[in-house]
Amino acid sequence: MADAHENSGAADGRPIRVLIVDDHEVLAASLAMVLDAEVDITTAGVATTLEQARALVETTRPDVVLLDHRMPDGDGVAAIPELRAAQPGIGVVVLTASAADHVLLAAIDAGASGFLSKTRSLDEVTAAVRAAAAGESVISPELLARLLPRFGRAGVHSADELTDREREVLALVAEGLSNAAIAERLVVSVHTVRNHIASLSAKLGAHSKLEALSIAVRQGLLPDL
C-alpha cells in the first residue's frame, strides 16, 4: 500500500528520526544499524520497555516508532494512544510475530500506521519507516482486504460531513492504493491527495489512514465494503 520512495526524509528535509521499541536487544541493535546506514533515516533511540519508550518519545521527538507488540511491561498496542499523545503526528508501525486479526484491528483502532512482521526483510523495514513518515499505511492490500470485513458496523453515519471527493479517496484507500497511486487515478497531485486524507481524517477523528478507513466502514460511509 505504500510507495517507499514517495517522500524520502522528514517533511522538513531532515532525516527521519526512528525510535525502536523492542525488548529483543539483538534485533533492536540490528534494526538500528540498518536504519543508521540509510542517508535519510536515523535512529533516535532504542527502548527495551514501554516505560523507556514513553520517556524517549518525550525527549527524542521521533517521526516514527517501530513498536513491538509484546513488551515485558505491557501491551505495545495498548500504549499507542499514549505515545501518539506525547508526539502528535507520529507514525507508529507495530512489529509483530503474529498477524492475528484481533491484534491488527486493535492496532488500527489505536491509531497505528500499520504492521511489520518480524519475518520481513530489512529492506522492507526501511521502506515501512519511509512510508509511515510520509503518512502512508504500512499494510499489504491482501491483508487490508482480509481485515475490512472485520471492522464491523456502528450504524449508518447521519451527518453529510465528507465531500464526494473525500469519499472517493477513502474508497481508493480501501483498495490498498498509495497516495501516489490515488493521485494518478484521480489525475491530481500527491499533495492534493494528502490534503484530502488530512481533511477526512480530521472530520472522522482519526489519527491514521487505517483508522480513518476503519471508522468510515463502521459508520457506513463505504457501504459496498
Image (cartoon, rainbow, N blue to C red):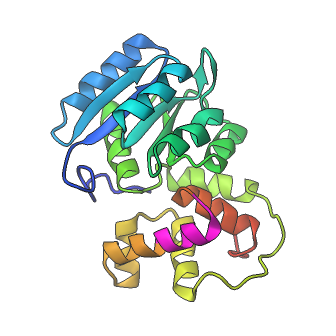
Viewer-proximal residue, 193 or 86?
86
Q: Position of residue 91 (x, y in %)?
A: 44, 46
Image point (47%, 68%), residue name: 198
* Residue at point 28%, 59% (across, down): 6
On screen, residue 27 versus residue 202, left or right, reads: left
Quadrant for residue 82, please give it: top right
Magenta-highlighted residues: 197-206
Q: Is residue 25 visible?
A: yes
Quadrant (top left/top right/bottom left/bottom right) for the N terminus: bottom left
What secondary structure prevails in the magenta region?
helix
Q: What quarter of the picture does the C terminus occupy? A: bottom right
Q: Residue at x 56, y 68 (%)?
A: 202
Determine whether 23 is above or below 82 in the image: above
For residue 120, say whether it is visible.
no
Q: Is residue 193 positioned above or below 85 on the image? A: below
Please say whether residue 46 is one of the residues in the magenta stretch: no
> Residue at image x 60%, y 14%?
72
- Give the residue furthest to the right: 155
The single residue placed furthest to the left in the displayed view is 39
Front residue of 138/41: it is 41
Residue 26: image x %, image y %? Answer: 38, 12
